[in-house]
Image (cartoon, rainbow, N blue to C red):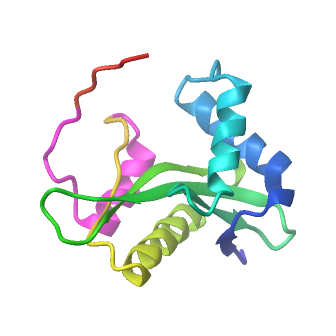
């Protein structure tokens, strides 16, 4: 399968929205407001905002995956680091190297921008994704995430 990894375009809104909704459904977050989706889309396409999006496009030009990421400063490093917040590959396109290609493309962005680290999180029971992540990174760093929600 031929896959092109590229930045999202304004004309991708409908296809991107379908992938985004599928991602939200995967994490049981279907009730996220449309205004939040619209704000994310706006942020992705605002140069002054750090959130970026790469998409995977198959040979038929269908979008089959997405990666949202952003850089931020870090208390332990001189240069920024990069957080891969959302990674999704459509169910029908899995096990074809698309997730790996998206991660490698974000990693290349980190290298190109001299960000010192790329990191991300996933749920502990996301076995399919974790198998890929373990292959790419050598395994978890041993940290456990905690959250206090303010909204």
Rendered residue at 31%/36% (across/down):
124
Q: Which residues are magenta?
A: 125-145
Rendered residue at 59%/65% (across/down):
98
In the figure, residue 62 lies in which quadrant? bottom right
The quarter of the rendered structure image containing the N terminus is: bottom right
Q: Residue furthest bottom?
A: 112
Instruction: State the image coordinates of residue 5 (x, y, percent, origin top left).
Output: 65, 73
> Is residue 94 visible in the rendered structure shown here?
no
Say which of 99 and 78 sits in front. 78
Instruction: State the image coordinates of residue 120 (x, y, percent, origin top left).
Output: 35, 52
In the figure, residue 61 lies in which quadrant? bottom right
Q: How many marks?
A: 0
In the figure, residue 10 lies in which quadrant? bottom right
> Is residue 55 visible in the rendered structure shown here?
yes
Q: Is residue 127 magenta?
A: yes
Q: Is residue 27 magenta?
A: no
Q: Is residue 109 above or below residue 53?
A: below
Rendered residue at 37%/18% (across/down):
150
Left/right of residue 97 with respect to residue 120 in the rendered view: right
């Amino acid at each position: 399968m031929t896959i092109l990894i590229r930045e999202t375009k304004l004309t991708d809104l409908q296809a991107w929205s379908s992938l985004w909704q599928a991602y939200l459904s995967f994490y049981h977050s279907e009730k996220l407001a449309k205004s939040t989706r619209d704000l994310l889309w706006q942020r992705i396409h605002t140069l002054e905002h750090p959130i970026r999006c790469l998409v995977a496009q198959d040979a038929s030009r269908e979008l089959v995956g997405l990666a949202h990421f952003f850089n931020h400063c870090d208390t332990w490093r001189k240069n920024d680091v990069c957080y891969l917040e959302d990674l999704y590959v459509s169910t029908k396109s899995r096990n074809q190297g698309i997730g790996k290609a998206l991660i490698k493309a974000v990693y290349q962005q980190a290298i190109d921008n001299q960000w010192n680290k790329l990191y991300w999180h996933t749920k502990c029971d996301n076995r399919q994704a974790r198998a890929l992540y373990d292959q790419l990174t050598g395994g978890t760093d041993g940290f456990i995430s905690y959250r206090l929600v303010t909204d």
